[in-house]
Image (tube, grey):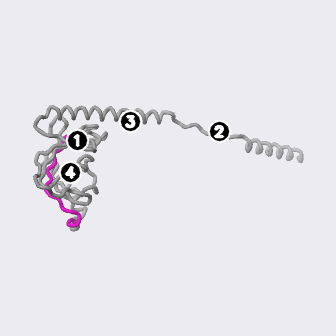
């Protein structure tokens, strides 16, 4: 019996020593394809952006009526109505009161101005169409501007889950009716904005 205990103890001790001295190898990553997937995704987005840019540039070339400006943010625009006198433009925190409509890139109306209703937008502090968030800051009260937006500055790869599809470039026309400077809009609370925009 004593011998059996000694043998068991020696066996356990040897196993313990063996386990502790074995070098563990680092596990390999589960997937080697992640980097390749990202590269393919980036390439796909570059091709999509280039294709949309070519479509928009062709529209601009064919339109001899309007004078387009290319923004530094990647969209194009022209003035339907432009103020001749210099007025303040909306800045962060201001309230912009506007009407707008959305068309597809061929000019077919997706949402009318009546469907979208008059909007109140707190500049740079509310979620809105990315290209228009920037574009509205170029406008003065009373101006009407048409923006040509590539899909990544519109509703992107998701669409709006209604009439706007995935990766759809858009034409949006905004009429800026009024601007309330931040210091003057303290009486309007966010719930008022939400009620008006629904």
Front of the two marks 1 and 3? 1
Task: Report crowding for label 2: few under 14, some 14 to 19, many 20 or more residues within 10 A (C-alpha).
Answer: few
Where does residue 49 sit, x and y in percent of width and height?
Answer: 30, 35
Residue at left 14%, top 40%? Answer: 67
Disc 4 or 3, which lies upstream in sequence?
3
Q: CA distance from mark 1 to mark 3?
A: 24 Å
* Cα distance in 3D space between marks 4 and 3: 30 Å
Kindly check if marks 4 and 3 are in contact, taking CB atoms under 8 A apart as contact.
no
Q: Residue at x 23, y 40 (%)?
A: 164
Earlier residue among tags 2 and 3: 2
Which mark is drawn over residue 42? 3
For mark 3, give the secondary structure: helix
Q: Nearer the viewer, mark 4 or mark 2?
A: 4
Magenta range is: 171-185
For marks 2 and 1, give the one nearer the viewer. Answer: 1
Q: Which mark is residue 138?
A: 4
Residue at 17% across, 35% down: 60
Q: Say which of 41 and 93 sits in front.
A: 93
Q: Which disc, if any, is residue 70?
A: 1
Residue 47 in percent (x, y) is at: 32, 32
Distance, label 2 to label 1, CA atoms, is: 56 Å
Q: Position of residue 2 (x, y in %)?
A: 89, 48
Q: CA distance from mark 1 to mark 4?
A: 12 Å
Which residue is under mark 2?
25
Percent x, y of residue 40: 40, 32
Q: Is residue 162 left or right of residue 20?
A: left
């Amino acid at each position: 019996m004593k011998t059996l205990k000694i043998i068991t103890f020696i066996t356990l001790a040897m196993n313990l020593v063996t386990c502790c001295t074995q070098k563990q190898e680092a596990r390999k990553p589960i997937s080697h394809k992640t980097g390749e997937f990202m590269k393919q995704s980036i390439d796909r987005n570059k091709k999509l952006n280039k294709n949309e840019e070519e479509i928009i540039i062709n529209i601009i070339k064919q339109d001899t009526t309007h004078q387009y400006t290319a923004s530094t943010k990647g969209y194009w625009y022209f003035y339907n109505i432009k103020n001749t006198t210099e007025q303040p433009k909306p800045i962060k925190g201001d309230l912009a009161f506007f009407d707008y409509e959305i068309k597809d890139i061929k000019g077919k109306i997706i949402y009318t101005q009546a469907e979208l209703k008059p909007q109140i937008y707190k500049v740079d502090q509310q979620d809105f169409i990315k290209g228009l968030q920037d574009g509205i800051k170029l406008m003065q009260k009373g101006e009407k501007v048409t923006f040509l937006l590539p899909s990544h500055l519109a509703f992107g790869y998701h669409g709006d889950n209604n009439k706007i599809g995935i990766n759809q470039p858009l034409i949006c026309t905004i009429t800026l009716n009024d601007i309330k400077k931040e210091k003057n809009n303290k009486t309007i609370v966010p719930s008022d904005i939400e009620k008006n925009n629904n």
